Image (cartoon, grey):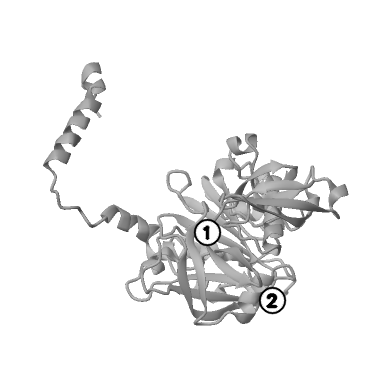
């Protein structure tokens, strides 16, 4: 913008005010009943919407893909390939939210005929009853409340290199399946190589779906860690040597998989000398075992504390285990608190710690500096270490 001079620039505000007053004076007395800007905002950011399951199909021998459409038949909100959605589950007296990476492509959510969004969920190994509930009980016709298009795990051309290597483990392939479909469709401008680690060849999630994709800008490399003599592809873990084999001189690395894989790849990418700005980790949920983290007071691990929950003028005291996050304690007691990522990142469960002490998981501490200073916590990443008093948001 051209600078016209100090007096003219400083006086610009008064000229704008004068123009606005003249516009008001000359406006029609008939009120404008449409709100085009609001309509666009509501279409793009509708908040929670009613979603109907329209299809359930196997994605591997231990996982299924669930397709959702809006109950009102409208298009789904836009999202980036790599983002996640949150579904609400009424369980007993509680309403529990869970995030799931979207495995369908953004363009499929904006189709003219039956726009949809999909997630792919693997059965748990005994520690994820919602995953098992989805795989065992959810069927076409079931209705959920959900929110689509959350998270920061997506390609940004102003920040990321044109060449992307996605490091996936198990069902962590889901955000990369979304990216791969978008690349193939021609609506995501990057060169994508997926190194997909699995234990056995007969349980590779979305294998056929991914191999049906074809684009000169997409390469999918399966890596098997299990002992199968007839396997013809890459073997072992996603080591620094294997990653370098498929990397361009300037590459951004996206990582999604189980928690143990995140810690392993931290070390491998450090060995490669990868700049931090070239590494993107998907949030990985609540810590499986908070007691293994440095600084956690293990002598308290078998204790249960009193958690006083403040909602407006209402207070209620509930039990809270030292090894479970405050969110879990609230859900056990049937107290609703909004959650999104459950990894300390999104801030949906941001609460005020009025008194007492907590241990915040260092890998999940996504608070702003000001929140740390003034006593705010993300309840999904905070574990009580004494009796506490916490003020939570009112829905």
Whether residue 265 is visible here, answered yes or no, is no
Circles 1 and 2, Cβ within 8 Å, touching? The answer is no
Residue 193 disc label: 1
Q: Identify the mark at residue 391; answer none if there is no mark.
A: none
Residue 204 shown left or right of residue 150 in the figure = right
Locate residue 355: give its quadrant. Answer: top right
What x and y, as percent, mark residue 67?
Answer: 49, 75
Q: Residue at x 68, y 44 (%)?
A: 271
Residue drawn at (18%, 30%) of the image: 18
Nearest to N terminus: mark 1 or mark 2:
1
Q: Is residue 13 above or below residue 78?
A: above
Classify 158 as above or below 34. Answer: above
Indicate whether 34 appears above or below 377.
Answer: below
Could you tell me which quadrant the N terminus lies in?
top left
Give the side of residue 366 with respect to residue 42, left or right.
Answer: right
Q: For this view, does 289 lie left or right of residue 256?
A: right
How far apart marks 1 and 2 lie (CA) works out to: 24 Å
Depth check: give the residue in front, 52 or 250. Answer: 52
- Is disc 2 placed on a helix, strand or loop? loop
Q: Which residue corresponds to the image point at 60% horizontal and 71% vertical from the top-left? A: 90
Q: Which residue is disc 2 drawn over? A: 230
Q: Closer to us: mark 1 or mark 2?
A: 1
* Residue at the limit of the structure toward the front, as seen here: 313
Q: Secondary structure at mark 1?
A: strand
Indicate the quadrant containing the C terminus: top left, top right, bottom left or bottom right. Answer: bottom right
Residue 193 at x, y percent in the picture: 52, 59
- Give x and y (percent) for residue 161: 48, 47
Residue occupying the point 60% across, 42% down: 367
């Amino acid at each position: 913008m051209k600078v016209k001079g100090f007096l003219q620039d400083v006086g610009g505000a008064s000229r704008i005010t004068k123009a606005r007053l003249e516009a008001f004076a000359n406006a029609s007395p008939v009120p404008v009943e449409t709100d085009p800007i609001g309509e666009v905002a509501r279409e793009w950011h509708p908040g929670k919407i009613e979603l109907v399951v329209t299809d359930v199909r196997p994605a591997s021998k231990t996982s299924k893909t669930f397709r959702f459409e809006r109950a009102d038949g409208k298009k789904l909100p836009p999202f980036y390939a790599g983002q996640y959605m949150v579904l609400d589950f009424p369980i007993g007296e509680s309403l529990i939210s869970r995030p799931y990476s979207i495995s369908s492509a953004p363009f499929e959510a904006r189709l003219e005929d039956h726009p949809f969004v999909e997630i792919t969920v693997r059965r748990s190994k005994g520690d994820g009853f919602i995953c098992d509930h989805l795989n065992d009980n959810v069927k076409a016709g079931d209705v959920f409340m959900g929110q689509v298009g959350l998270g920061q795990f997506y390609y940004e051309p102003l920040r990321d290199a044109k060449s992307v290597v996605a490091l996936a483990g198990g069902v962590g392939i889901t955000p990369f399946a979304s990216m791969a479909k978008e690349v193939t469709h021609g609506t995501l401008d990057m060169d994508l190589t997926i190194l997909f680690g699995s234990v056995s060849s007969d349980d590779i999630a979305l294998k056929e779906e991914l191999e049906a994709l074809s684009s000169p800008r997409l390469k999918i490399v399966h890596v098997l860690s299990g002992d199968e003599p007839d396997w013809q592809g890459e073997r072992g873990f996603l080591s620094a040597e294997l990653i370098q084999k498929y990397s361009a001189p300037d590459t951004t690395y996206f990582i999604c998989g189980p928690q143990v894989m995140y810690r392993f790849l931290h070390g491998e990418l450090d060995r490669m000398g990868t700049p931090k700005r070239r590494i993107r980790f998907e949030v990985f949920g609540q810590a499986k075992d908070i007691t293994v983290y440095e600084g956690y007071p293990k002598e308290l691990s078998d204790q249960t504390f009193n958690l006083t929950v403040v909602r407006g003028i209402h207070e209620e005291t509930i039990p809270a285990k030292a090894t479970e996050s405050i969110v879990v304690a609230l859900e056990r007691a049937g107290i609703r608190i909004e959650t999104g990522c459950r990894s300390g990142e999104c801030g949906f469960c941001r609460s005020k710690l009025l008194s007492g002490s907590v241990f915040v998981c260092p890998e999940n501490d996504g608070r702003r500096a000001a929140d740390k200073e003034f006593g705010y916590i993300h309840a999904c990443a905070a574990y009580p270490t004494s009796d506490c008093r916490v003020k939570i948001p009112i829905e």
